Image (cartoon, rainbow, N blue to C red):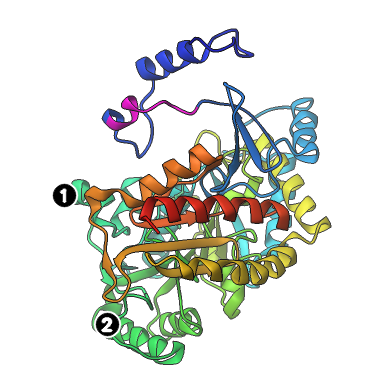
Amino acid sequence: MKTAVTSQGLTYEELAQKNKQYLWHPFTQMKDYLEDEPVIIASGNGRKLTDVRGKEYWDGVSSIWLNVHGHRVPELDQAIRDQLDQIAHSTLLGMANVPAILLAEKLIGLMPPGLTKVFYSDSGATSVEIAIKMAFQYWQHKGQPQKARFITMKEAYHGDTIGAVSVGAIDIYHKAYSSLLFESYKVPYPHRYRSPIGGNDREQTQYFLAQLEETLEAYHKEVAALIVEPMVQGASGIVVMPEGYLKGVRDLCTKYDVLLIADEVATGFGRTGQWFACNHEDVTPDILTAGKGLTGGYLPVAITVATEEIYQAFLGDYVEMKTFFHGHSYTGNQLGCAVAIANLELMERENLVSQVEEKSRWLAGQLEIFQSLSHVGDIRQKGFMIGLELVLDPETKEPYRWEERMGVQVCRRARELGMLIRPLGNVVVFMPPLASTRDELEAMLGILYQSIEEVTGE
Ligand code: PLP
């Protein structure tokens, strides 16, 4: 049966056909995708999305971890309209613009103390790419060009450009490109559920810091920087660090004269219940990258923020060639910066970050019920970042086989029940918009519970 004509004057079937004919989707096996009925989003409102056939879904993954207040937020919509009445875009190469200046000032006010200069780009991956080049060139300017390698964490994800993949370590995403990449040293991320030792947070922290120190001791003379996803390693399956680890990483980087890059692309802007994950342990990195939630989930703006020490190292006479040779066409885009300012102002007015903190404590209580599902092996949470690891056998922690696509199946059932989420292998990720109310969260958790229960056969 043909569906009604959509607002674009096309039926669902016509759009689905064009989708099939012209589009190649990110992180998607198109062969599988084309066998499925595509969801085609027509509109959004608050925490919900509506497809062209009129079915509503909760945005349970914040449109890939970035939505803050919801969709069609009047203040954010208006900020873009107002900016459009001035100008949409002019370059930041050699000239400035009003929203880019004002946003940079606002951001520095929110950053961990000691970060003073904002460099704009347009995605999380580019913000990481910039951090890598900045750290690399910094040591050249300091007369130590041999400090040119990077330390990263096993299972890290920092984006999909070649530099970001070189400091990434998720085999299924990165292995195909291995011969294209520069090599980095890899140390284990402190993963309590899959840790080789038992023990409490303090023991875990000590154990994993000792491993890091071994690597630093051996290689620090050739290492420019260590890059880490602070407090939560996202794409590896929402893995939460034990207390004290991040602070320990900061201290070790200082001790061995290695720059610390905190990749806050996923964790920044309130997602973990603090403005930045680094705030949980009063850590100031040398370079911080962020994106995603910066514009409330509206437009692609990302930032790489550096300390004065790093910025100053790039100053010199024109002929010295100390310039940071990096930039993108849309760097400092006015529409993006304008909506980012509106987003941050609304977050402040609504005290959103404290609200996330408070609601996440309540959420932790709500999540306890998932323990009654016998294939939920681990429940991980920091703020509004939640991962439920599904296992075949909770006693032995034996994972489901990749071919079983357990995560995919759960998310497919959730979609039928009216919530859009995306898995990470066997980990079901729940990442609601930060402004979701308790009632909304309860409704979303209900779908999550039912989906896992039905698919894992409880
Ligand atoms: N860094 C981290 C920690 C991320 O989680 C992501 C994306 O999920 C990225 C970088 C890449 O961001 P983007 O997809 O905007 O390039």
User: Front-most of 284 and 57?
Assistant: 57
Where is residue 57 drawn, in percent x and y?
59, 38
Q: Is residue 416 visible?
A: yes
Choose top left, top right, bottom left or bottom right for residue 221: bottom left
Observer-nearest of 120 and 145: 120
User: Picture coordinates of residue 269 (x, y %)?
Assistant: 63, 58
* In front of the other: 373 or 385: 373
Region rendered in magenta: 32-39
Q: Is residue 376 above or below residue 318?
A: below
Disc 2 target residue: 196
What kind of element bears circle 2? loop
Tell me the residue at 47%/55% (across/down): 429
Residue at the spot of label 1: 179
Give me the residue at 79% from left, 61% from top.
351
Q: Name which quarter of the figure residue 112 lies in.
A: bottom right
Looking at the figure, which quarter contains the C terminus?
A: bottom left
Q: Which mark is residue 116?
A: none
Ligand 1 closer than 8 Å to label 1 CB: no
Identify the residue shown where x is 39% and y is 22%.
23
Does residue 34 show up magenta in the picture? yes
Amino acid type of the residue tagged 1 in the rendering: Ser
Report x, y in % for residue 218: 23, 83
| Side (left or right) of 429 relative to 192 | right
Earlier sequence position, callout 1 versus callout 2: 1
User: How would you rate the neighbour count of disc 2 (Cα within 10 Å): few for under 14, some for 14-19, many for 20 or more?
Assistant: few
Q: Residue at x 41, y 84 (%)?
A: 252
